[in-house]
Amino acid sequence: MILRTFFGKTAAEALAQVREQFGPGAAVLETRRGAGGVEVVAAAERPGTWGAAAPAAPVLAAELGAPPAAAERLRDDLVAWGFSLPFAARIAAAARHNLDAEQLEDRIAALSYARGLVALWLPAGPAPAPAVLALVGPPGVGKTTTLAKLAAREICRGEHPVVLASADGRRLGGAEQMEAFARILGAPFVAVRERRDLERARERAGRGALLMLDTPGIPRGDRAAMEGLAGLLAGVRREEIELLLAADRDADSLTESVKRFAPLRPGALGATRIDEAVRPGGLVTALARAGLPLRHLGTGPDVPDDLEIADPRRLAAWAVPLPGEPAAPWRGAGTGR
Ligand SMILES: Nc1nc2c(ncn2[C@@H]2O[C@H](COP(=O)(O)OP(=O)(O)O)[C@@H](O)[C@H]2O)c(=O)[nH]1
Ligand SMILES: [Mg+2]
C-alpha cells in the first residue's frame, strides 16, 4: 500500500490531486488545515488501483470540521478492542471521509469498512521457500511449540528433507525438548552453539533441505544474549528469521518487542496465543506499525493442529467483530459479540 500527503490551497484542490494520482477510489485517511492551505493524507494499493480493493465505495462526502458522533463511536469501539488511540482515530477518520453519512451511522457498515481497511493495512505476502526458518522472540512466547507444529506439517508434506536444530542452551532442557520431538518425527537434530555449528548443520542438511531452528527466549534488558543470538544468525537471510509476538499482549508491549528484536533482523512476524487474546486490536496495531509480513498464527497449544498460515482478512474479521456475528473463528478467542 502507498500512503502519500497532498497539498492544495483548498480541500477540493488537494482532493483533485489525490484522484489524479491515485485514481477515483483512493481512500482519504486524514485532512488537515495548515497555514498555507489543506493537507490530505491518502492511500492506494498502487497509484490508480485502489478502487478494485477498496472495502466500500468511497464517497468523499464529509466536510472538514468536528468529527461526527458516529465516527467517534467507531473510534471508541476500536479502542475498546485494544487498538491504539492513534490507529483507531486514523481508521475512524478514513471511515468519515470515505463513507456517506448514512453508512457511517450504520454500525455494521462502519465496522465492515474498518475491517476491510485493517485487512488492507496488515502486511502479508507469500513466504519465500526458505532454506532456514529461525523462530525468535521473548521467553515463553511459543517458539518451541510453533516450530514443532511447523516441523510436523513440513515433514508430513514431505516436499523436502527437514532438519531440526536448537540454539536454546539457555533454558534447562531447552534443546532436549526439540531433540525429543525430532526423534518422534524421525528427523535429524543438531544442537547449535555458535555460527559455525549452524553453517555445518546447513551443509549437512544439503541443498533443498529446510533447517528449522529454535532459539532461546531473550528477556528484556539482556543485551549480551541478544548480541550472541545476532552473531549466530548473522549468516541467515532476513526472510528466514520470524519474530513471534503473543496476541494476548497490548499494542505498546508488542511494539516494544518488535523494536527490541530489530538487531536480529527479522523479515517476518508470527503471532501466537490468538486463542488467549481478549483485546485483539493490540496485535493488529503492532503488526501494522511493524510493517513486516505476518506468516503464521498459533491458535492454541496443540501440536500440530493449532497453527494457521496467516490470512489478513481472517485476522481483521477476528479483530473487528460485528454485532450478531457467530462466535470467533478460534477457540476462546476474541471479544464478546
Ligand atoms: N494457548 C496457547 N498456548 C500456547 C500457544 N503456543 C504456545 N503455547 C504454550 O505456551 C507455553 C510456552 O511455549 P514454548 O513453546 O515453550 O515457548 P518458548 O519459550 O517461546 O519456546 C507452553 O505451555 C505452550 O503450550 C498458543 O498459540 N496458544
Ligand atoms: Mg523454547
Image (tube, grey):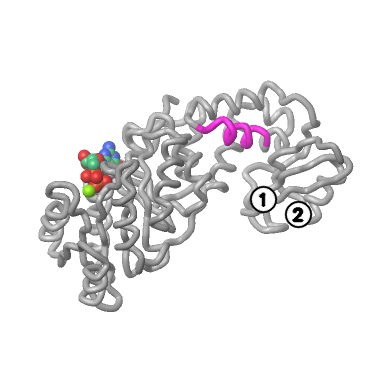
* Spatial CA span between label 1 and label 2: 13 Å
Residue 32, quarter of picture:
top right
Q: Decide which of 26, 147 is in the foreground and name it.
A: 147
Residue 163, quarter of picture:
bottom left
Task: Please name the amino acid that badge 2 sits on.
Answer: Gly
Residue 159 as seen in the image, left or right of residue 72: left
Q: What residue did someone put label 2 on?
A: 23
Element assignment for label 1: strand
Circles 1 and 2, Cβ within 8 Å, touching? The answer is no
Q: Decide which of 297, 102 is in the foreground and name it.
A: 297
Residue 18 vertical position relative to residue 60 in the rendered view, above or below: below
Element assignment for label 2: loop
List x then y, in percent, for residue 25. Answer: 73, 49
The residue shown at (62%, 36%) is: 91
Number of dots carrying numbers: 2
The answer, for residue 300, to whether it is visible in the render is no
Q: Decide which of 29, 173 is in the foreground and name it.
A: 173
List x then y, in percent, for residue 178. Answer: 16, 55
